[in-house]
Image (spheres, rainbow, N blue to C red):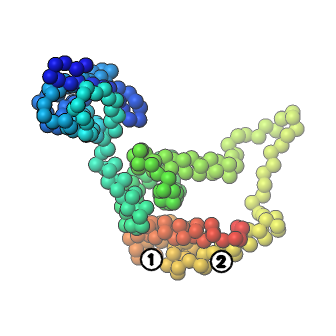
Amino acid sequence: METKGAISISGVVQDTKTLEFISGCNVYLKSDRMNAAYSDEHGRFNLVVPVGEKLQDILVITGAGYEPYRNPISLASSLKLRINLEKRKTDRAQQDNELVMLALNGDQRSYGKLMARYRDSIFFMIQKMVNNRDDAEDLTIEAFGKAFNNLGKYSPDYAFSTWLYRIAINNCIDFIRKKRLETFSLDEPVNDDDSSGSSRDIKADNLDPEEDYMKKQRILLMRSVIERLNPKYRRLIEMRYLKELSYDEIAHQMNLPLGTVKAQLFRAKELLHNILKNSKEKY
């Protein structure tokens, strides 16, 4: 509403994503911070500006927890606006986004920095879920592998840590489900008086000749794939997955720091995955 010698800049302030009204926002022109208005509980504000020689100015709106809004406006007549504010990102979230962008542009060190930031917290979360250190180590590496392979799908609208944790949790849930399916429980007692006549068949541990042959063929095929790896990575894969050594045992045998072993195994698994993915053979 215009008054003599003044114009009105009014409107509503909302959250960009939720569209909720934002109260307590400070609204003013850059040229006159002393003349300010505040948004009410419905996000509404009304700034009365004296008409002067300036025909343009910068409208500034600030709110707790939100990025400042700055936009040029005309002072020729009254304005009615709808302003959307974006949540302010924490310094850590901004750093994560910068590392993601660098990684997508080919900076290999950025992958290492992201992994170093969240490796321990991801590992301890997974260890609580699976209650096994070696499984947790493997699942942690797998979680980062899946995240890095799908980094192009990450949206900066959400915190990188939230996205990464969701991948790790889903991967862990899949592992637990698969393990339960593969485990035959003998905890339930067998009722010998079962009138239904049903019985529980327990398979012998020994494979039949056909299964034994297929298993040997798979091992031969896998070895042929592993042979295509760099000798350093090939040895790591063999020690971890064929000899079934722990990370600590590998570090001791190779005289390497534990962190180096984990990082190199992550790279080895990634290379192995790419070979299998690009191969026409079926394993």
On the image, the x and y values in percent for residue 78 come to 25, 26
Q: Earlier in the sequence, mark 2 or mark 1?
A: 2
The image quadrant of residue 254 is bottom left
For this rendering, which residue is in front, 81 or 121? 81
Q: Looking at the image, is mark 2 or mark 1 nearer the viewer?
A: 2
Please give the residue where the numbered disc 2 appears in the rendered image.
224
Above/below status of 143 relative to 238: above
Q: Looking at numbered disc 1 in the image, what kind of residue is underneath it? A: Met
- Which residue is found at the position 29% from the left and 22% from the top? 44
- Which residue is found at the position 55% from the left and 51% from the top? 171
- Disc 2 to disc 1, C-alpha distance: 23 Å
Left or right of 160 in this view: 50: left
Residue 124 is at least partly visible in this image = no
On the image, the x and y values in percent for residue 245 come to 53, 68
Look at the numbered disc 1 and give the secondary structure of its residue.
helix
Above/below status of 217 relative to 193: below
The image quadrant of residue 237 is bottom right
Left or right of 223 in this view: 154: left
Q: Which mark is residue 254?
A: 1
